[in-house]
Image (cartoon, helix red, strand yellow):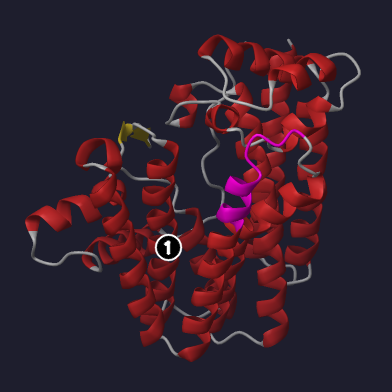
Amino acid sequence: MKAVKALATLAIPIADEELNRLELRLRREVLRDDPFLDEIATHLIDAGGKRLRPRLSLAAASLSGAPLTEETLLGAVSVELVHLASLYHDDVMDEAERRRNVISVNAKWGNLLAIVAGDFLLARSAEIAASLGTEVARLLASTLARLCQGQITEVKDAYRIDRSEADYLTAIADKTAALMATACRIGGITAGLDSERIDLLTTYGESLGMVFQIRDDVFDVIANDRELGKLPAQDLAEGVYTLPVLRALEDPVSGAELRGLLGGPLSDAEIVHARLLIGRSHGIIAATDVAREFAQQACKAAAALGPLPIAESLSGYALGLIDELERSTEALAS
């Protein structure tokens, strides 16, 4: 299987000064003058990342035309802490050994400390959100409930070859799109935007989250560990059948063989074979088509914000994810 292009860099322009403030504040908000806890809590912060969710918060707030406020900065930090906490917990569930090309927290310190450290990050996020008022606190709490619901649904449906596409879309809306929608919404709230623009930003974030997760699910099948920053095909190994897999199961050529292979734990050789079958099917292209529909929804919401550079950048990022996915699909077919 050919390697795909590395994941694209973020095309949402945020001033370097604001990004530097974000990084410093993100780290500062989890430090507790306890060297051991501080090391665990900052492990993935120090590993870097695109900071997509806080970038969305800052981009949404920039529609006000005013300088970055302390409230917006804290809102962006609270969203990123929820995301980081979810990674700590996900790696325990996945028994992952690497994350962002560094050793995972659970592999380095054990599952118990990884879980408790993730809980600590969630607690800090909740504390920050509470300082921003009841609307933000309530929003973050309801988002966390959606994240948990999506994860529970995914675990419940493990190894189900009859998992419906509707169930899949509902699960990723909860576990991924919800937090991106909240990131955009918090940016709008803290910047004092009107309700119409806040709702448009929320729609954009929700649609973008769907694109982002479908893209990740495709890459989980076709990418390698260097490109992903973690082991590929983890979903297949855990019996989580994502959109490219569900569509591949319907393929007239590869579907029957794939159906006979899935439904239970796979050996390493069976995982390799399953990835080949999915890659040869129409599953990858079909999943990309669905992602494109959500990208168009995101672009429609961004365009309604007005002819502004940041709105155009938001549209460009959604379309850029699709372009990247299509290039990767073409590389796979060649």
Please identify the residue farthest to the right as the structure is shown.
Answer: 252
97 sits to left or right of 257: left
Label 1 element class: helix
The residue sitting at 56% across, 53% down in the picture is 151
- The image shows residue 73 at horizontal and vertical percentages of 39, 73
| 145 shown above or below 36 | below
* Residue 3 lies in quadrant: top right
Question: Split into 4 quadrants, where in the image is the N terminus?
Answer: top right
The one of 195 and 176 positioned closer to us in this rendering: 176
- The image shows residue 227 at horizontal and vertical percentages of 48, 26
Question: Split into 4 quadrants, where in the image is the C terminus?
Answer: top right
Q: Is residue 207 visible?
A: yes
4 sits to left or right of 88: right
The one of 40 and 241 positioned closer to us in this rendering: 241
155 is within the stretch colored magenta = yes
The one of 135 and 112 positioned closer to us in this rendering: 112
The one of 195 and 277 positioned closer to us in this rendering: 277
| 55 shown above or below 225 | below
The residue sitting at 60% across, 38% down in the picture is 216
132 sits to left or right of 238: left
- The image shows residue 60 at horizontal and vertical percentages of 57, 70
The residue sitting at 43% across, 43% down in the picture is 93
| 119 shown above or below 291 | below
* Residue 264 lies in quadrant: top right
317 is within the stretch colored magenta = no
Q: Amino acid at mark 1?
A: Val
Q: Which residue is mark 1?
A: 82
Crowding at dot 1, Cα within 10 Å, few <14 / some 14-19 / many 20+, comes out as many
What range of the chain is rendered magenta?
150-161
